[in-house]
Structure formats: structure tokens, C-alpha cells
Image (spheres, coloured by chain):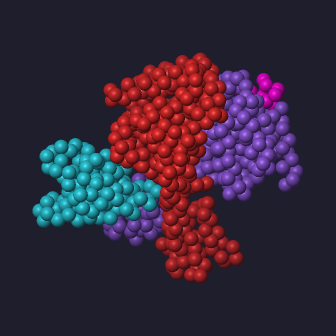
Chain colours: A red, B purple, C cyan
């Protein structure tokens, strides 16, 4: 079983549209994991049926039981996150600021503070329109996107892939370079970078690759909208060569991405669009590259 | 006045709007633009200016001093993040897991875990004409954006007048970093695009803003592609639609090259004027 | 010698848990007393962070000499495991505990 993770650093490069296309091309050989849990969009294209839903808890929040509180203020003194609010002597926890470190509960002399597990979101296992399975999630608003939900989605997908002897796990990775994307990348066999030739596109590509490099994973790159700025496309090509990244495809600027999205379809489900064939070629190239790993 | 520019999904034009709006507004009054999308800060690619100031940003972590340590194990028991681990007579510390709560340090009976500084990123301050620009950037390999965001906001608080216009280019999404970036602002501009992804992510962003009890409005970018569902949604939810920016290859080209566009595209400038009038209106109301 | 297994249950017939940090159970087999004991590690499922290092610490406190597991510990957990001096054998993810032990005896597992 091989794990393919698609990341982009920057948003809006077409990452999810391309990943969903691969999911359709891979059909039943693939278990899909949507690890872009912060702004999950794959469900809009792949028609999941939300067959299994599970609440997801992570970390803790302090809670002050007013009956036991003697208003000594010790919790207020030790909290580094200004999460303890005092109004007319009444001590309460501001949930948005609380990091769940538990320090306040440890110093409370009257056992008035307890730590409650925090619900951060929901994790789903669904049958999608290809007949295969997708694991995805909805992060609660303002939740700590700790990477744990990402890890959960991935592990769940891995177990299913193991049980059902599937060839690939396809992961729509998280944006940025922080904790969630670190979780998305861990354990991957191949990383697909989706970028665009803009000053921010190349900037974020280099930043996210710095992270990928630490994991020492074989990497390929798709340059979407390559014709928008040929100069930067050339710079990206030089960068790929210098880092020994496989150039998978350059796709021209095309509004078919939006058109397909409006129909709730992936690009490869459209009739005879040129981009469709380019994505199909890319998928074949990825599969070939994986064979030699 | 503090205004955050945010979006549920990345790549909707948040940075384009932030940089152009900041430069445009700086023609009328003093403005500071602050990029706190610390994982991928991009505003600086569009702003040219002179470097005024640069500083490393730190978080505090415990540092083990084995001389006095009695190996009681209290430190690893009190750490909810498992950033402190005891293996026999060895204490291991994992800086990236540490949330700087000080519990292990302050509860250590032998004071063997003093807190020390650990670099997590860098803050820079540029000046260009009437515009001040501040950007923070998380070091690669650091996982926590929130401490860097909060320290950057404090830098703005301590160095700039509350009465000037402060624009914050916020991280995308709906989780902790966005909350940290928007919780103290007066108004949030949500940037989206007229596509199913755009609408889905806008709904999430709106939920977040409702939870924070924020005043907010929507700027619709790339208007003309996709459909009218975002507009219908805003009407149904009574969300002010502050500006419509037409989809244009010219904008995409200028953006790709790192250029500001409002000087060249009058149509785009008109939308910035709409946003400015809207901001003035809110200011009057306050 | 104490052999540790990451497992989804507490018996020889339980499936191995491919995960390290968030493994449900740690089974310890003492090959002198021939006793199999178990440690409930399910609390790790609730840890937002640092499950790996914590599980490594648990293993150390259980006095394991070698670990038999699926994918093996990564990053921080690997650093802790190095300190503990516990040997790590991987590649036993898709087996029962019994099969994993047999594979270990035959030298079929990969030592990290």
C-alpha cells in the first residue's frame, strides 16, 4: 500500500480539484482521506454518504465549579493565557483562551477546577461515488487544529486500506507549514505539490518543500495555470530540477476547474476537456513513479 | 480602528485585497498593514519599503538543570502536552510540544526547570510612504502559529496608535490561528469567490465570526465566474456585501508578478473606494 | 527478556496495532517466566499531542527490552526510544500478536 499526499502551501492552486480527480481515476484502488479538515471541500465533488460519524475529542478545557470556588485567585495568578476572568469575585474560564494545560486545576486548593475533554469535531467514514471509501472530518469552529484530527483521519484511512488490501491512500493535505500539514505528511510515500506561477505561489512552494525535505519523501510537482506567468514558471522549473523533484505536469489557466465544481463533478468526469486528459496523464505518471520507489 | 481580512479558504484573494486596500487607504490617512498569516506570509511580496526594524520572536520553554534534580517525576506528570518525559535519570524536553504554561517549571520542588527563550519566528517592520508594514514569519519546523500571532498583535498594540487604520492579513481557516488573529478587531472583511468551494468555506467563516460576536462583511472576488449562490446566501443571511471584484485575467497577471493593481485598473479602484466608504460609515456609527 | 508488542487487545490472538504512540495496548511477554501481561494505553487516544513520547516512556517504565510493532515510532518518540535503549522491530502490523512473536523468533522482522 502506498500513501500519496497532495499539498500546496498556498490556497487556491487547484489542489482539491486535482486530488478529487485522482480519486475518481483511482476508483476502487484508492482510499481517500481529506486532511484539509479546516476547510474541507472534497465532499462537494465526491458525494460522500456520511455512513459512519464519530465525535472527536482532543485536549481539555478547564471548568470552574462555582460551588467549590473560594475565590482565592490562585488560578488567575498561574494562568499564562489570560483564560481566567474575574467579575465581582466570580472566577470563570474563557474557553477561547484556555489552552488546557491544567495548571490552574493543580494549584486550586478547593478542587473547584476540573478539566473537561474538548469536542473538536466530527470524523466521517463514507462511501463515495466511485464506490470506494473516503475518511473526512469537520473541525469545530475555533477548535485547536492540533493535527490530531488530521492524524485520526489518516490512520482511519490506513486501517481501511490495510483491511481491504487497497493499493493507494490518497490524502488531500492541509495548507500552511504548521502542525496539521506535518501530520498530513508523516508516513507518506509520495508527495504531490500543486503550485501556481505567482510570487506567492513559488514563495509558498519553497516554504512547504523545506518541510517536505525534512521527511525525505520522494516528491512530484504540478504547475497549475502555468501560462499566467511564464517567467515564474521557468523559475519553478529550475527549482524543481535543483531539488530533484519530478515535474509531473504543467496545466494551463482554465476555467474548467470552476465549471466542473459548479456541476459537483471532478474535471475527469467532463466530456473531452483537454485538462481532463492532462490530469489522466499525470495520474499515470504518479503511479509509474510509485512503482519504482 | 482594527480590521482583519480573512477567508475560510485560502487563495481567494485575501492578500491581494489587503495589500491594495492598505496602499490605497494610506493615500488618505496613516495605515499599518500587518501580515499575521505567519505560516505563509505573502503580503511583503507586494510591498516595497525600507526596513525599520527586525526582531526574533521567542516562546518560553523549560530547560533542564540536572545538578539539583531529584528525579521526582513531577514535571512529566503535570505536563498535559507530554512535552516533558522522564527516562530513568534523564529528563527530555520537546520544545515544539510545549505550550509555555510554566507548570513544570514553577511546580518543580528543586527549581531544576528554569524557563528559557526559544526562537519560533521573526518579525519585520517596513515603512513605505504613508504605509507601515509589519510581517511575522514562523520558522519552518515550528508547529504553533498562535504564540507568534499574539506577540505580533502586541507589537502593533505597543507601537502604533489605536486611532490609525490597522489592517490584519489573517490566516485562512476557522481554527485557533484565525481566532487569535481576529478576536480583538473591530471589523472583519471576509473574502470569498463565487464557487461551491467559496460558498462552503464562507459559511464556515461566518459561523466563526458569529461565535466571536464580530461585525463582518463580505468582499466577493473573481465575480463573473461560478454562480450567484454566494450573493443569494449573503442576502438571505443579511450579510453586507461590501464590494464585488470582477474576475479578470489582468488582475491574475498583475498578482502573479507581485504588482499592486488598483493604480492601473480603475474598476478595481472603484471597489476599494466602496470598501473605504463602508469603513468610514462604521467609524461614524461607533 | 521482556518483549513488548503494540496490540489491539490483550491476548496472543489479538491483532497487532500498527500505530505506536496511540496503540490501544502494550503487551509484555517475559520469555523466562513465559507470562504475558498487558498495559492499557488507550488514554493516549485523548492526547492532542505527544502520544509517541509518552508511550515510549510507558514502555521504559514497563521495563521492556525490545519492542515489536507495525510502522515503528517516528520523530519525537524515536528520540525517546533511543534514550531508553529498547530495540525496535517493525513490520509486524498486519499480524496477530502470536504471529508477530513467531516472525520475531524466525528473524523475519526488521530491526530499526
Which residue is nearer to you in this view: C15 or C85? Answer: C15
Q: Residue at 48%, 49% (x, y): give it.
A: A125
Above or below, comparing residue B51 to residue B253 in the picture = below
Which residue is nearer to you in this view: A163 or B38? Answer: A163
Q: Quadrant of the C terminus of chain B?
A: bottom right
Task: Indicate whether residue B266 is drawn in magenta.
Answer: yes
Which residue is nearer to you in this view: A89 or A232? Answer: A232
Above or below, comparing residue B137 to residue A145 in the picture = above
Q: Position of residue B13 (x, y in %)?
A: 68, 35
- Magenta residue span: B258-269
Q: Main secondary structure of the magenta part?
A: loop
Does residue C39 appear left or right of residue C22 in this picture? left
Q: Is residue A161 visible?
A: yes
Task: Indicate whether residue A169 is drawn in magenta.
Answer: no
Q: Position of residue B176 (x, y in %)?
A: 59, 52
Does residue A177 appear left or right of residue A142 in this picture? left
Q: Residue at 32%, 50% (x, y): give it.
A: C18
Q: Position of residue B155 (x, y in %)?
A: 65, 49
Q: Residue at 68%, 57% (x, y): give it.
A: B211
Q: Quadrant of residue C42?
A: bottom left
Q: Quadrant of residue A166?
A: top left
For the image, the number of numbered tags is: 0
Does residue C39 appear left or right of residue B34 in this picture? left
Q: Position of residue B158 (x, y in %)?
A: 69, 52
Q: Is residue A226 visible?
A: no
Q: Residue at 79%, 25% (x, y): give it.
A: B265
Above or below, comparing residue C12 to residue B143 in the picture = below
Amino acid at each position: 500500500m502506498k500513501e500519496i499526499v497532495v499539498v500546496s502551501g498556498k490556497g487556491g492552486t487547484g489542489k482539491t480539484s486535482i486530488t478529487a480527480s485522482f480519486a475518481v481515476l483511482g476508483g476502487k484502488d484508492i482510499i481517500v482521506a481529506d486532511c484539509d479538515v479546516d476547510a474541507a471541500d472534497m465532499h462537494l465533488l465526491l458525494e460522500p454518504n456520511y455512513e459512519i460519524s464519530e465525535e472527536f475529542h482532543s485536549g481539555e478545557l478547564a471548568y470552574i465549579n462555582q460551588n467549590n470556588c473560594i475565590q482565592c485567585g490562585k488560578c488567575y495568578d498561574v494562568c499564562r493565557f489570560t483564560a481566567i476572568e474575574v467579575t465581582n469575585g466570580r472566577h470563570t474560564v474563557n474557553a477561547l483562551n484556555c489552552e488546557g494545560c491544567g495548571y490552574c486545576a493543580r494549584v486550586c486548593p478547593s478542587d473547584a477546577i476540573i478539566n473537561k475533554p474538548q469536542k473538536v469535531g466530527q470524523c466521517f467514514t463514507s462511501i463515495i461515488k466511485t464506490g470506494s471509501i473516503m475518511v473526512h472530518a469537520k473541525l469545530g469552529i475555533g477548535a485547536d487544529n492540533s493535527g490530531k484530527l488530521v492524524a485520526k483521519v489518516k490512520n482511519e484511512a490506513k486501517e481501511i486500506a490495510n483491511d481491504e488490501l487497497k493499493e493507494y491512500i490518497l490524502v488531500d493535505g492541509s495548507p500552511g507549514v504548521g502542525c496539521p500539514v506535518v501530520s498530513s505528511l508523516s508516513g507518506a510515500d509520495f508527495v504531490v505539490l500543486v503550485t501556481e506561477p505567482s510570487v506567492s505561489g513559488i514563495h509558498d512552494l519553497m516554504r512547504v518543500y523545506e518541510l517536505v525535505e525534512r521527511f525525505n519523501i520522494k516528491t512530484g510537482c504540478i504547475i497549475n495555470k502555468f501560462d499566467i506567468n511564464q517567467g515564474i514558471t521557468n523559475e519553478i522549473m529550475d527549482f524543481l530540477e535543483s531539488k530533484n523533484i519530478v515535474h509531473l505536469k504543467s496545466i494551463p489557466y482554465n476555467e474548467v476547474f470552476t465549471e466542473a465544481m459548479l456541476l459537483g463533478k471532478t474535471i475527469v468526469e467532463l466530456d473531452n476537456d483537454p485538462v481532463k486528459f492532462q490530469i489522466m496523464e499525470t495520474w499515470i505518471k504518479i503511479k509509474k513513479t510509485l512503482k519504482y520507489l | 480602528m482594527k480590521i482583519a481580512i480573512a477567508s475560510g479558504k485560502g487563495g481567494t484573494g485575501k492578500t491581494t485585497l489587503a495589500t491594495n486596500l492598505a496602499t490605497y487607504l494610506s493615500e488618505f490617512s496613516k495605515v499599518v498593514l500587518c501580515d499575521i498569516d505567519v505560516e505563509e506570509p505573502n503580503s511583503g511580496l507586494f510591498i516595497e519599503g525600507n526596513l525599520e526594524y527586525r526582531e526574533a520572536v521567542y516562546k518560553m520553554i523549560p530547560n533542564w538543570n540536572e545538578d539539583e534534580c531529584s528525579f521526582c517525576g513531577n514535571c512529566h506528570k503535570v505536563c498535559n502536552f507530554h512535552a516533558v518525559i522522564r527516562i530513568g535519570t534523564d529528563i527530555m524536553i520537546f520544545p515544539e510540544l510545549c505550550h509555555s504554561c510554566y507548570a513544570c517549571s514553577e511546580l518543580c520542588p528543586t527549581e531544576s526547570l528554569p524557563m528559557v527563550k526559544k526562537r519560533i519566528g521573526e518579525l519585520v517592520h517596513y515603512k513605505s510612504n504613508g504605509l507601515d508594514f509589519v510581517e511575522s514569519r514562523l520558522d519552518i519546523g515550528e508547529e504553533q502559529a498562535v504564540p507568534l500571532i499574539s506577540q505580533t498583535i502586541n507589537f502593533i498594540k505597543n507601537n502604533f496608535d489605536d486611532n490609525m487604520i490597522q489592517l490584519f492579513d489573517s490566516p485562512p481557516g476557522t481554527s485557533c490561528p484565525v481566532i487569535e488573529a481576529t478576536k480583538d478587531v473591530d471589523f472583519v472583511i471576509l473574502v470569498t469567490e463565487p464557487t461551491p468551494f467559496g460558498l462552503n468555506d464562507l459559511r464556515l467563516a461566518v459561523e466563526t465570526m458569529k461565535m466571536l460576536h464580530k461585525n463582518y462583511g463580505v468582499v466577493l472576488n473573481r465575480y463573473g465566474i461560478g454562480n450567484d449562490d454566494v450573493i443569494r446566501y449573503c442576502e438571505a443571511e443579511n450579510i453586507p456585501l461590501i464590494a464585488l471584484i470582477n474576475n479578470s485575467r489582468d488582475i491574475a497577471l498583475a498578482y502573479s508578478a507581485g504588482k499592486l493593481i488598483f493604480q492601473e485598473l480603475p474598476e478595481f479602484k472603484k471597489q476599494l473606494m466602496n470598501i473605504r466608504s463602508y469603513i468610514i460609515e462604521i467609524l461614524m456609527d461607533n | 527478556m521482556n518483549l513488548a508488542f503494540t496490540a489491539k487487545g490483550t491476548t496472543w490472538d489479538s491483532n497487532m496495532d500498527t500505530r505506536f504512540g496511540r496503540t490501544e495496548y502494550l503487551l509484555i511477554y517475559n520469555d523466562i517466566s513465559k507470562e504475558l501481561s498487558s498495559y492499557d494505553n488507550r488514554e493516549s487516544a485523548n492526547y492532542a499531542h505527544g502520544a509517541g513520547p509518552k508511550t515510549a516512556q510507558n514502555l521504559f517504565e514497563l521495563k521492556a527490552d525490545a519492542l515489536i510493532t507495525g510502522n515503528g515510532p517516528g520523530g519525537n518518540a524515536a528520540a525517546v526510544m533511543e534514550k531508553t535503549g529498547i530495540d525496535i522491530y517493525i513490520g509486524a502490523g498486519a499480524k496477530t500478536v502470536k504471529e508477530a512473536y513467531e516472525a520475531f523468533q524466525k528473524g523475519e522482522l526488521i530491526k530499526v
